[in-house]
Structure formats: C-alpha cells, structure tokens
Amino acid sequence: MPRFSVIVPAYKVQAYLPACLDSVLSQSYPDLELIAVDDCSPDACGALIDEYAARDARVKPVRLAENQGLGRARNAGIAEASGDYLVFLDSDDTLTPDALRAVADRLKETGDPDVLVFDYARTYWDGREVRNQLAAQLTEQGPAPFRLEDRPGLLRVLMVAWNKAYRREFVAEHGFRFPPGYYEDTPWTFPVLLTAGSLATLDRVCVHYRQRRQGSILGTTSRKHFDLFEQYDRVFAYVEERPELARWRPELFRRMVDHYATVFTKRGRLPRGSHGEFLRRARAHYRRYRVPGARLRLRHTLVRFGLHRTFRALQLAAAVRRRTAKAAVRLVRALRAGALRLHYGIQLRLPLRPDRAVFTAEEGYGDPAALEEAFRALVPRVSTAWIARPGQERAVPPGPRRLRPGTADYWSALARSRYLVADTAFERRLRKRPGQVFVQTQQGTPLGHAGLDLLERPAAARGLDCAALLRSVDQWDYVLSGNRHATLTWERVHPGGYTTLEYGLPRNDALQRATAADVARVRSSLGVPEGAVAILYAPARRDHLRTQRPLLDLERILRRLGPRFVVLARTPVPVRGTRIIDVSGHPDTAALCLASDALLTDYAPVMFDYAGLDRPIVVHTEDWAAYEAVRGAYVDLREFPPGAVARSEDELIDIFATGHWCGSRSAQLRAAFRERFCPWDDGRAAERVVRRVVLGETEPAPVVPLAERAPAPAACARSPLATVPQPSGPLPVTESH
C-alpha cells in the first residue's frame, strides 16, 4: 500500500501532461502510485499515459470509454486508489520538488489527520510566480491537528481539491464524490472541510498552478458557468442533512454570494445576453439561503435585489473613475519628470562638491559598502550618501545618508558629487561631468562569463544591452580587481580607458579583521545553535532556467549528516526546513561567511572571497556540463577546485559524513586556490583604494603575506565537533583528487 495515490485526470492537455507526470514521478518521496485517467481525450494524452506506464510501474492508467468531465474522471481515479492519502493534481499543473516529502513529514508530525491543506503558487506563461495571497491562513503555529472551528479562516483559501491531501479511509467512510459539471470542487471541498475530524496545514508551496494564456476551462465563455448554482444547491443540501453543521451557513452564504459576484463580473465567462438571467438566478439563491443578520457588502446587496442595470452602471462609473485617475496620475508624473529634468540640468551647471560621494550596490552591501566605511574613516571631510532603491531598504549599510531614486536630492547628488562608487551601472540618464571620479567595484572575481563574452552566450545574456554597457564602461575611471585573473578578464570583457586597481576586494577586509567574538556575535544573531557545524549553502543562479528551483535536497542531506549540522541557505528561492536557516535576504554576505564553518556552493563567485578565510569549501558540480554550455566558465573547478568536489548529492553527503570536507587534502587544494585568487586580501584593500582615488597616493600599502595572515577561525574549530574524522589521502570524488 503506497503512502500517496496521486490522481491526474487528463483531457486535451497533451502539451502540459508530460511536465505534470514528471513532477510526480521525480519526487524525492517515491512511495506513491500515479493514477492517470484518460478522460477519452481526443489528443495524445492516452498515448502519453501509456508511455509513462510502460516506463514506471507506479503509473496506473485508467481509460474512460467516453468523456465524463473532470469530476467523474477524479471519481474513477478514487475507485482505483490504494494509497493512505489521496492527492489530486490537474494535468496542466505540477508538484514542486520535494513536495510529497514535505507533505509526508507534516502528516507524520500531526498524527495523520483527515485532511492536510498546503499552499500553492500561480505560475504564468511569462515566467512570473505569485504565491497564494492567503498563505497566512496556513501557518503551522498553534496546536495541530485541529478542527475547522479552531481555524475558520481556512474556508477563505481557494476552494479547490488539489491543495489538500485526504486520508482515503476518511473519504470512503463519508462517501465523498465529485459531481458532474463546472465548479465541481465546490461541493467537494466545503463538505470535506466541514466534516473532517482533524485538520492540519503545511506552510509550503507544493503545487504550481498554471495560468494558461488560453484554453483553461473556467476561462471559456459558456453557459456551463450556470452549473455553479446547482453546485451550491449540493453544498447547502449537505449541510441541511446534518444539523450539527448549521453554524456554518452564514460563512457558506457569504462565500456563495462572493462566488456569484465574481463569476458575474469576470469578463468573457458568461455568454452575451445571459448576464440578466445569471443575476436573476443568483437573486433566487440569495433569498433561498439567506441567513438573517449576515453582514453584507455592496456587491451582496446588488445580488440580493438582482440590480443588473445598476450593477452595470456602477461598473461603468468605476471604469470611468479609474481611467480618469490614471490620466491624472500620468499627467502628474509627466509634470514631475519635467521638473526633475530641469532641476538636474540646473545642478549640472553648478560647481562640483569635492566633499561629496555617492554609493550604490546591486544587492547587499558588497564592495561599495566597505569603501563607504573607509571613506568615513580615512577622509571624514567627505560626506557619503547611499542610493536606496525600492525594496532594498534592508540592504542599506548604517552610516551614509539615504537617497531615494527619482527625488530632487538624488539628482542633485548625481550632478554635484565628486565621487561615484558602484558595483553596477548608475542611472542611465547620468551625465558624467569633468572632474567626477567613477569607481566601478565589479561584483567579485569572475567565474562565469561576463561582459562582451556573453554575446556568445544568448541564454545567459538575456536583457544585456551591449551598447548601454559600453557607454557605462566609458564613464569608469577606476575598476577594482582582487587578483591577476580578474584584472585580465575585466580589461578584456569591459574594454575602456579606465585604470585597474589590483589592490584586493574591499568587501573581504571584514573577513580578515574579524575576531572570534565577531564570529560568535553573528552566529547568535542568525540563530545558529551553540556547537553546531554551520554550512553556508550559496548556489549560483541558473540563467537557463526561467523558474529557479532548489538543486539539492537540503533536508535529506541534514537527515543523513545528523543533528550537529545546520545549513545557512542563501538561495535564489527561499528554502525552509528543520535545521535550515533561510538567509537569502541577508544583506551582508561577509557576515554569513564569518558565521559558517564551511561553504557549500557550485559556481557562485563567493568561493573566491571565502577562500581568504581559509575555511573548508565544498563544490557541487552535478550540472557542470549545463552551466558551462549556458554560461561558460573561466576556471574549471574540476581541475582547479578550492576543496572537495562532489558530482552528486550522495557524494556530497559522503564528503561531509566522512570528514573529507575538512581533511588534509581539502586544505591542500584550498591553499593553492587561495594563493592564486587571494593575493591582496589582507584586510587593507579599501584603504589602498581610498588612498589612491581620494588622497592621490600612487604606491599601494604593502600586502601582508598569506602565511602571516590570521583570519578569524571557524566556530567549530574551537568546539568538540572539530574531532570528526578527517581522513588524509586522496578524495574519491573528483578526477583531480
């Protein structure tokens, strides 16, 4: 008996069905059966199901002799199910990676409730992903399992069958079945939630709900939308047969009226000429099921009285009001933009301020923040300001004055400040004046292709404007570099007349100056348990993937490694789980490096910074061929790695479990890597830059030799956990070992 029976009805979805079935069969929790129901589909759905059944014994094909519709197709799947829990999935949607494992874990935690409700996200054809707006209703805080009266807000979550797992015996005991027609989820979901003796929630996106451009059933114009009335008749009939459920009538009534108003107002659902009839039937239902004393909104009143023309008039008035407001907003914006252009033009004619400097970074603190701190320390006469873009308020370092883009202060600062420091392009309308000094810090040591080299990598170069890039390069006076490799790369892919300052990377100064007390303070602020081995997981973004997804099952890895390990996850997509600390939004990468005992990455440039700490680095290169083909790499990490290399998740687990991650061979590889890429990272890079750019000193301060540097030791180096086995000799996980 499998744990899950995943039921997928298929009808006219041949383009989406393979992705749906793959998302189920590739789950890291394999204890499942996939019941794929061919609802007499006229396209290739049936053939696709047969192909999957031939390849995987977990696929149980069900063929219907004639088209039954979504509800009855699901019923056919239920009849074939043998799993502990039923999970429904529409054939154009997908399960997210590791969804069933998360569901299984939550079911175990909550004692196998009748129903588990999990979250979903809408995914759009253009790549956008929007999580359910009522995700707060799925919080796992508080007692679990519970009954619906403990969390009535669950009735406001989208009433669909596919965002829940149902205990099969519970469904069989109460004889729940899907009715025919549109909106078949309504008379299924309401009775199930009202009847369940135990409920639980999982605050995790487990389903990607595809929003198709065309072809979705509920998005078509049809009289089948009138089925909604019969479906609510079924809901209230169920409640009337069970007096103990009468207390839910007010909430069901409100949901019903909201649903009718939504269908009525959605453009393109009801055929032309049928709106009056729909509203009349809605009025009849309003009177039939009305609950005295129910608090109603305006749209409820319109449904109550069947005010079809009034409803339309109010809609028209609202549309006119919106258009008028938009026109007024456009006019105000145009006037404001014109005033700001005039202001900027005037500021450009005023003298430069030699005591002003402006800083900005694409994300986080980075090199500009380290330079800003050095400005204040070494040349306090220079006043500093930081451009705080919308959504990046947390990424503004303490100290500098904040500038909001698009304000008069912002344009004044760009026009009159002598020093401009950034790791990205400044405002495209910036006019660099004679006497202004532009310092481009870049974003670390390059591993993947950048600049003009991306012209040969179209998948990675999406959005690259080569002409704009070169215009920006022509404004640079200085470019920072941490090593000879970076110098040669930047000067080739960003050709220009600037001067390269190969002085080290200012952002790495903090790694050299930090003390053991600083490490302890940062770990405490992040919630790292005392004595734990903290792994900083920082993978690179995959340019060829429209939707980023986790590449490693961190929970599985931690289960295999045991309770002494925790993961600081700095990933493109936030990751949650036991002993996983989400630091994806943390602005200070240097602080995360200090808090960790080892770095786990794949192709992220942070490995070059981390090497300066002289702490273990483990590289996961499972999709190296894809990365190299899409992005291209300047350094072959398989031939010149900074530490142990894992080519699979199992090898990665073995590296940490056996102690190879902090063994002698790993240290040898790291030493060679550090010597090549960290020659200047001695804690004084920012000072060298400021002395050259602002004070005019042409000879950089002497660099501290690698052997004499003493970066703060990792926390686990001072704990009993440092006694984990550390085998010497070759590592069996990469050819170079």
Image (tube, rainbow, N blue to C red):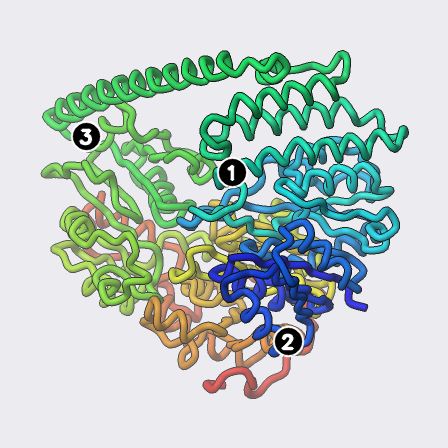
Write down the residue under mark 3.
416
Which is closer to the viewer, label 2 or label 1?
Answer: 1
Which residue sits at x=59%, y=61%? 40
Q: State which tag comes first along the sequence, 1 or 3.
A: 1
Name the kind of residue labelled 2 in the image.
Answer: Asp
Name the kind of residue labelled 1 in the image.
Answer: Ser
Residue 691's x, y, as percent?
Answer: 25, 48
Rendering quarter of residue 461: bottom left
Q: Which mark is residue 222?
A: 1
Judged left or right of residue 361, residue 289 is right
Q: Secondary structure at mark 3?
A: helix
Residue 106's x, y, as percent?
Answer: 75, 53
Q: Alpha carbon of mark 1 to alpha carbon of mark 3: how far?
A: 63 Å
Write down the residue under mark 2.
56
The answer to whether residue 595 is above or below residue 329 is below
Residue 534 visible to the viewer: no
Q: State which tag comes first along the sequence, 3 or 2.
A: 2
The answer to whether residue 38 is above or below residue 667 is above
Rendering quarter of residue 146: top right
